[in-house]
Image (cartoon, helix red, strand yellow):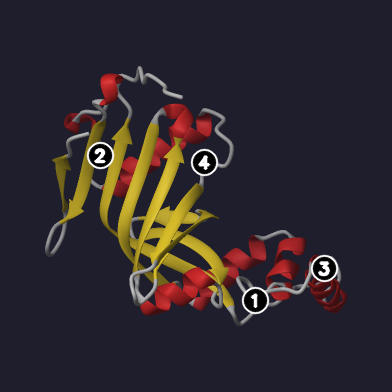
Amino acid sequence: MRAQYQSTGLAEEDLATDPYEQFGRWFAQTAASGLHEPNAMIVSTADAAGRPSSRTVLLKAYDGRGFVFYTNYGSRKAREIAENTHVSLLFPWHPMARQVIVTGTAARVAPEETAAYFRSRPHGSQIGAWASAQSTVAASRAEIDEAYERAAARWAEGEEVPVPPQWGGFRVTAETVEFWQGREHRLHDRLRYVRREGAGWRVERLCP
């Protein structure tokens, strides 16, 4: 179970001036390649005692301020972020022999930003946000389905569904962003942006 990477590599002179622009370049290339859900990322958090947990979440926005995802504020990841704001994001673009690894801190987005995104979701997903007490223990699948049916009865298709008070977004502000490109003989290219004190970024090459 071993693959030999044949990519042309990644050089310092090819990088954008900041990691968000560079991410945009790679994200566009990944989406154009036809990769399923290129916005899927692994979000890793840790509780106050340092015990880690990970899960796959969909990236819903990014710009010079950071990377945004949405969740139930009662979920395990949200509870851990409340205790420890340091998080890691991993974009595993295996078919392109690429990874992007972000470390930084997470904070809630403004309610207005959450509302704007929530209105863009399909009706069923809006109802699901009301029905699921994410990460809590359910007695059965029937209990979850019944909660959905009760919520669906409150807001028929076509009616405006309000944003649940326990639901919203997080923005991860990057402290480091590593761009990993697979190369032959496991001598991969690893270029990492590190935020400078004050403003700007420096780039450092890591040994593979």
> Which secondary structure, mark 4?
loop
> Which of marks 1 and 2 precedes in the sequence?
2
Q: Which residue is mark 1?
A: 163
**Amino acid identity at mark 4:** Pro
Asked whether disc 3 touches disc 1, contact meaning CB atoms under 8 Å apart, the reply is no
**C-alpha distance separating marks 1 and 4:** 26 Å
**C-alpha distance separating marks 3 and 4:** 29 Å
Compared across the picture, whether 111 is left or right of 177 comes to: right
Compared across the picture, whether 97 is left or right of 121 comes to: left
Asked whether disc 3 touches disc 4, contact meaning CB atoms under 8 Å apart, the reply is no
Q: Residue at x 84, y 69 (%)?
A: 142
Asked whether disc 3 touches disc 2, contact meaning CB atoms under 8 Å apart, the reply is no
Task: Check the picture and name the quadrant holding the C terminus.
Answer: top left
Q: Which residue is mark 2?
A: 16
Q: Residues within 10 Å of mark 3 (few under 14, many from 20)?
A: some
Any mark on residue 145, and which? Answer: 3
Mark 3 against mark 1, which lies toward the viewer? Answer: 3
Mark 1 against mark 4, which lies toward the viewer? Answer: 4
Residues 143 and 87: in front is 143
